Image (tube, rainbow, N blue to C red):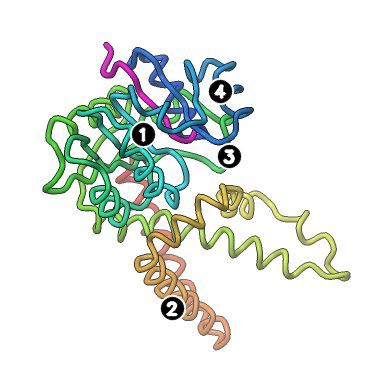
Amino acid sequence: MKLFEQITVVGVGLLGGSLAMACKQQGLAGRVVGFGRNRDNLEKARRLNIIDEYFTDLSSAVKDADLIVLCSPIGSFKSLAEKMVSAFKPGAILTDVGSVKAPIVREIEGVVPRSVYFVGGHPIAGGEKSGVDAADKDLFRGAKCIVTPTSNTDKTALKRVVTLWERLGMKVDAMDAEEHDYIFGAVSHLPHIIAYSLMNTIAGLKTANHERIAYLGGNGLKDVTRIAASDPVMWRDICMANKESVLLCISLFQETLGKIKGQIDQGDGDSLERMFSMANEHRLAMCEKNE
């Protein structure tokens, strides 16, 4: 059943392309419009039947949209919202897929007119690949989605956005934006920072005497660093936007790593084993809760 006459996806990459593809397959929109700066990318998306049509002019892409979804890097959200102001039709809903919520919600609520309804959203889906070629109509199925309503959020608009994600197979929960950013600073943003740092550390160990270091890593290294293949621009914006939580998590991680370093340096194998065992138990508990 159709939820919106027109959905406009701003940024037709992995998330935007997957959303457009899934909405088309589920019949959730009369038409799905894509916006972006790269005409070749948009033409490819149209040719692959990911979108119905596209525009490189933002006002043209937005003016008839009932739902606009920001799927570009979060550093662009505010400027995009400001450019849309004169093009929104009354009653339009604006939402996003950003991994940081508090600053985004504050900025966009301060920009959009009262006749337009903003609902902060974060579908917890994605992968290390990027671009429209990686789009997957089943990307959201079985995954979680967070919405971050405020006292300003229109209840009808919120319900429609929640229904959209549920129709795409997601389990939707509401959460305070500040709490969201604290939690995801730990469970998402810190792991990406660690993966990037680990790859750079290993690359820095390469010398004339250790030429093969990058080629001898097994599945463990590949597993831990898989997300280091993620889009650097997207993750730059996420880290900068969630600065407070990210810095706190880095400090806590450095503290834990410092303990491990000290135990190894002092030959305290018993304490080291206890720390590893504790981590093992925490991971098993986490996996059981996510089943």
First in sequence, mark 3 or 1: give its number: 1
Mark 4 crowd level (few <14, some 14–19, many ≥20, 10 Å Cα): many
Residue type for callout 4: Ala
* Location of mark 1 (residue): 69
At horizontal 56% and vertical 85% (from top left) the residue drawn is: 267
Give the spatial CA distance, label 3 vs label 2.
31 Å
* Location of mark 4 (residue): 45
* Location of mark 3 (residue): 129
At horizontal 12% and vertical 35% (from top left) the residue drawn is: 155
User: On the rendered structure, is 254 left or right of 64?
Assistant: right
**Residue 67 placed where, x, y %?**
30, 27
Pair 3/1: label in front: 1
> Considering the numbered disc 1 on the image, is that residue within a helix, a strand or a loop?
strand
Give the spatial CA distance, label 1 vs label 2.
39 Å
Residue type for callout 1: Val
Q: Are marks 3 and 4 in contact (CB under 8 Å)?
A: no
Relative to 279, residue 48 above or below: above
Predominant secondary structure, magenta span: strand
Pair 4/2: label in front: 4
Q: Are marks 4 and 2 in contact (CB under 8 Å)?
A: no
* Location of mark 2 (residue): 255
Pair 3/4: label in front: 4
| Viewport quadrant of the N terminus | top left
Residue type for callout 2: Glu
Give the spatial CA distance, label 3 vs label 4.
16 Å
Write down the region rendered in magenta: 1-11
Q: Are marks 1 and 4 in contact (CB under 8 Å)?
A: no
